[in-house]
Amino acid sequence: MKCKRLVHGKNGFTLIEMMVTLAITSIIGVGAAAASYHVLNQSASNNDHTSASQHALNAVHWISRDVQMAQTVSPEGASGFPLTLQWVGWDNTGYEVVYTIDDGTLRRSYSADGELESEVVVAQYIDPDVEMTSCEFSDGVLTLKITTTVGEGSHAESVSKVREITPRPGL
């Protein structure tokens, strides 16, 4: 039986080179996986923040628009909601807008001369806690605070907007 001799000068990788290559590849793979996880979670967080901000801004926009038209501003309850706004148009038509918060949804009911013209959802994800969402009418100025929260638990994104709005004077 012949013994095989080790042949020197053959090309190939040693065990140490293979282990170093495997270690480097593993480190790169773990880094790529961590980066991908972070990007996906950050995207969800950004989407939630954008959604919360958009709903809060939409609520402030609609309420501000109607308060600036109103001659009578009547917040009710501890939070100021429902908020009733009334005014008389140039053609002596009586208008009334009522904002209500129900189950985190801000609704706007619009009536002309006592007849309901429309009822729309203005914003969602409204935090109904009196400390977070409220309106108060004092010294001719409505102070409005709207907080929206999107997401669950530790991943929840909250946005608060505060605005002081002056209605038009009664004519």
Image (spheres, rainbow, N blue to C red):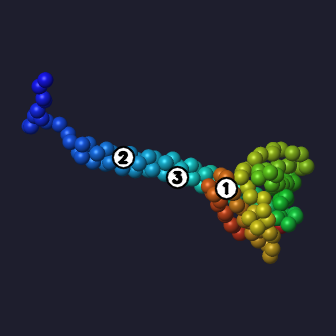
Q: Nearer the viewer, mark 3 or mark 2?
A: 2
Q: Is 33 left or right of 67, judged from the image as shown? A: left
Q: Position of residue 61 (x, y in %)?
A: 68, 57
Question: Closer to the N terminus: mark 2 or mark 1?
Answer: 2
For mark 1, give the secondary structure.
Answer: helix
- Of 165 and 113, nearer the camera is 165
Q: Amino acid at mark 1?
A: Gly
The answer to the question of whether label 3 and label 2 lie on touching residues, with beta carbons closer than 8 A, is no
| Pick the front one: 52 or 99 | 52
- The amino acid on which the numbered mark 3 sits, given as a three-letter code, is Gln
Residues at marks 1 and 3, CA–CA distance in whole angstroms: 15 Å
Query: In terms of secondary structure, where does tag 2 sit?
Result: helix
Q: Which mark is residue 119?
A: none
Name the residue that disc number 1 marks: 153
- Amino acid type of the residue that numbered disc 2 sits on in the rendered structure: Ser
Q: Which residue is mark 2?
A: 26
Residue at x 71% of width, y 69% of height: 164
